[in-house]
Image (tube, helix red, strand yellow):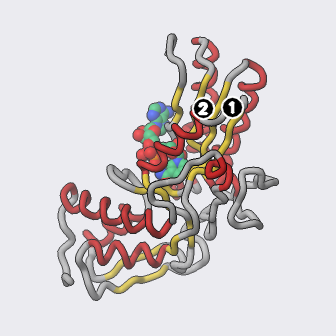
Amino acid sequence: MKGSDIVFHLAANSDIIKSAKDTRIDLEQGTIATYNVLEAMRGNGVKKIVFTSSNVVYGEAKKLPIPEDYGPLFPISMYGASKLACEALISAFCHNFGFKAWIYRFANVIGSRVTHGVMLDFYRKLLRDSRELEVLGDGKQSKPYILVDDIVDGMLFGMAHSSEDVNYFNLGTEGMTLVSRIADDVIRAAGLRGVKVRFTGGVRGWPGDVARVSLDMGKLTALGWRPRCGSSDEAMREGVRAIVAELGKSLGPVKGKTI
Ligand SMILES: NC(=O)c1ccc[n+]([C@@H]2O[C@H](COP(=O)([O-])OP(=O)(O)OC[C@H]3O[C@@H](n4cnc5c(N)ncnc54)[C@H](O)[C@@H]3O)[C@@H](O)[C@H]2O)c1
């Protein structure tokens, strides 16, 4: 780390369903890992950090779309609690040790080389059984999606156009996309027809799932940034096409009734 100008800290636990059951996962792989990164930076004289936070720090916000100055922040998941704790630690290091930080509260990220998330989950389920697709919750969960290329672009743009000690931004798209719509689009992109979509029920997909989220993108927009795919539905459509084509090659095509 010595001699580096900046640390991009992206490491985290991504299995939020597992961490709802094992309460140490996000504490260790999120909060303590971030503290260790900050301490290593302090020890090596590195003073700039970019941190990938999440919209889940807002919890079940009473205002949609949610602006960055929304409060109080009461996350409802272990993952969200850890992201908020990381933001707090970063702020304290900035104020005590002259660090500068760029914190990005991401929407749901989609696109090439996906490692987890709703689309991969749907595709894997269809590979196992292409007659029926299980969707966690009632299908009405609505969230914003953003393409990974736009995430990278937005992070670099925010860094180039802000210079407070602690800079923090929502990083997403306008609007939100229904999970039942993602199911339909994945089925169509996989070339299937006649798939029965079965909802497990309940407003949340899992404990700690925030069922409705939309992000106010005014802060980055005011600086002049626009994502290439500006609406959540548009980003999701493009993401589904890219992911399903890629998974078809790596995991194999889904066999079943085809369109
Ligand atoms: N993907 C999303 O929708 C989304 C949304 C909001 C925030 N984020 C945040 O963005 C960041 C990147 O997310 P992603 O989707 O690419 O996740 P990912 O799981 O694909 O990547 C995270 C990586 O961190 C690594 N990691 C975890 N703990 C580590 C440790 N102690 N030391 C070294 N490596 C470690 C994991 O092995 C993994 O490769 C994460 O901080 C995540 O919380 C992602």
- Where is residue 139? Give x, y as percent: 51, 78
Give amino acid for label 2: Thr
Seen in the picture, residue 139 relative to 30 is either above or below; the reply is below
Seen in the picture, residue 53 relative to 17 is either above or below; the reply is above
- Camera sees residue 15: no
Seen in the picture, residue 203 relative to 96 is either above or below; the reply is below
Other-residue count near label 2 (Cα within 10 Å), few / some / many at <14 / 14–19 / ≥20: many
Seen in the picture, residue 8 relative to 54 is either above or below; the reply is above
Q: Which mark is residue 34?
A: 2
Front one among 22 and 256: 256
Give amino acid for label 1: Ile
- Where is residue 1? Give x, y as percent: 49, 16
The residue to which callout 1 is attached is 90
2 or 1: mark nearer the eye: 1
Q: Residue at x 73, y 32 (%)?
A: 91
- Numbered disc 2: secondary structure: helix
- Quadrant housing residue 209: bottom right
